[in-house]
């Protein structure tokens, strides 16, 4: 006999059935009363088990509609090619990659002049009170919130490339725009981490309970100095990041790109 609490037994059994495809993404789970009969458990116990699956991001609940297996249509991001000017792009890297995957990009913008946050100031090698230009993007894939991106530039850079401080999209992408104005980024340092979302991130990305975020911080360098720091926050359930390192000729063309 299992020593697990009954509600965990319910959750574990349903999780196995979700994993093996008995209940595929988008499928509705049996009602609480049906599960009560199946597991010989009270509805409160069943509800606790279902609630555990909700907090783990496996199931969503809607008033009057019951419980549904969460849909996770994962987007693949190749971080090695992202912003790499040697690869052809139609517009910015985000729009190019999303369109190439046969999906629809959409993003909103805002621009602010503000002091550099401490972690950004460290990476840009400026004092925390130094002014920066913040370009903030809220990005969608197929109308589903995908990421937020906050990019900080030293304020002096906007004197050389004035469109940085203007609201709205830079259609060719900021990396190409800066390169055309004499600031070519020739190297990047990436830091990737995961954590649970802040309340603001959960709201902007419409993240369900129990779903973490993937945080990607990229510092871009010219030959002389760091010139920007980008913090991208992704929904952890809808994104997969990969890198290409070294000779890739032995890879199958059917493998993820």
Image (cartoon, grey):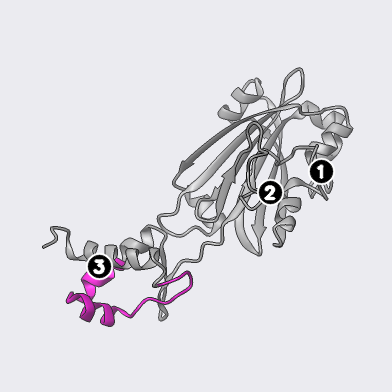
**Residue denoted by label 2:** 137
Per the rendered image, the range of residues in magenta is 23-50
Can you give x and y, in whole percent of width and height, for residue 64 in the image?
40, 81
Of the residues tagged 1 and 3, which is closer to the observer? Answer: 3
Q: Is residue 95 above or below residue 59?
A: above
Point 67% across, 25% down: residue: 130
Q: CA distance from mark 1 to mark 3?
A: 54 Å
Q: Quadrant of residue 136?
A: top right
| In the image: residue 21, left or right of residue 193 | left
Can you give x and y, in whole percent of width and height, for residue 135 in the image?
71, 42
Q: Earlier in the sequence, mark 2 or mark 3?
A: 3
Check if residue 183 falls in the magenta segment.
no
**Residue denoted by label 3:** 10
Q: Where residue 166 is drawn, which disc sits there?
A: 1
Can you give x and y, in whole percent of width and height, for residue 10 in the image?
25, 67
Of the residues tagged 2 and 3, which is closer to the observer? Answer: 3
Point 25% across, 71% down: residue: 46
Q: Nearer the viewer, residue 130 or 31?
A: 31
Q: Secondary structure at mark 2?
A: strand
Asked if disc 1 and disc 2 are in contact, CB closer than 8 Å, the reply is no
Q: Quadrant of residue 228?
A: top right
Q: Nearer the viewer, residue 197 or 243?
A: 243
Q: Quadrant of residue 156?
A: top right
Q: Which image quarter is the N terminus in? A: bottom left
Across the whole image, how many numbered discs are drawn on residues? 3
């Amino acid at each position: 006999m299992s020593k697990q609490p009954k509600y965990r037994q319910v959750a574990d059994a349903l999780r196995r059935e979700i994993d093996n495809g008995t209940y595929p993404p988008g499928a509705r789970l049996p009602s609480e009363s049906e599960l009560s009969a199946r597991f010989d458990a009270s509805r409160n116990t069943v509800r606790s088990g279902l609630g555990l699956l909700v907090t783990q991001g496996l199931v969503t609940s809607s008033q009057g509609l019951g419980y549904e297996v969460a849909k996770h249509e994962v987007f693949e991001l190749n971080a090695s090619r992202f912003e790499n000017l040697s690869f052809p792009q139609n517009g910015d890297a985000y729009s190019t990659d999303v369109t190439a995957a046969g999906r629809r990009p959409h993003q909103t913008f805002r621009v602010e002049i503000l002091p550099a946050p401490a972690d950004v100031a460290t990476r840009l090698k400026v004092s925390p009170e130094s002014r920066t230009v913040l370009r903030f993007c809220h990005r969608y894939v197929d109308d589903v919130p995908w990421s937020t991106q906050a990019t900080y530039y030293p304020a002096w850079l906007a004197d050389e490339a004035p469109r940085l401080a203007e609201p709205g999209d830079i259609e060719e992408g900021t990396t190409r725009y800066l390169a055309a104005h004499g600031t070519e980024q020739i190297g990047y340092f990436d830091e990737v981490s995961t954590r649970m979302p802040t309340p603001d991130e959960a709201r902007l990305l419409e993240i369900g309970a129990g779903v973490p975020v993937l945080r990607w911080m990229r510092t871009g360098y010219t030959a002389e100095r760091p010139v920007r720091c980008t913090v991208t926050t992704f929904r952890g359930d809808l994104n997969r990041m990969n890198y290409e390192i070294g000779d890739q000729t032995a890879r199958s063309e059917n493998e993820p790109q």
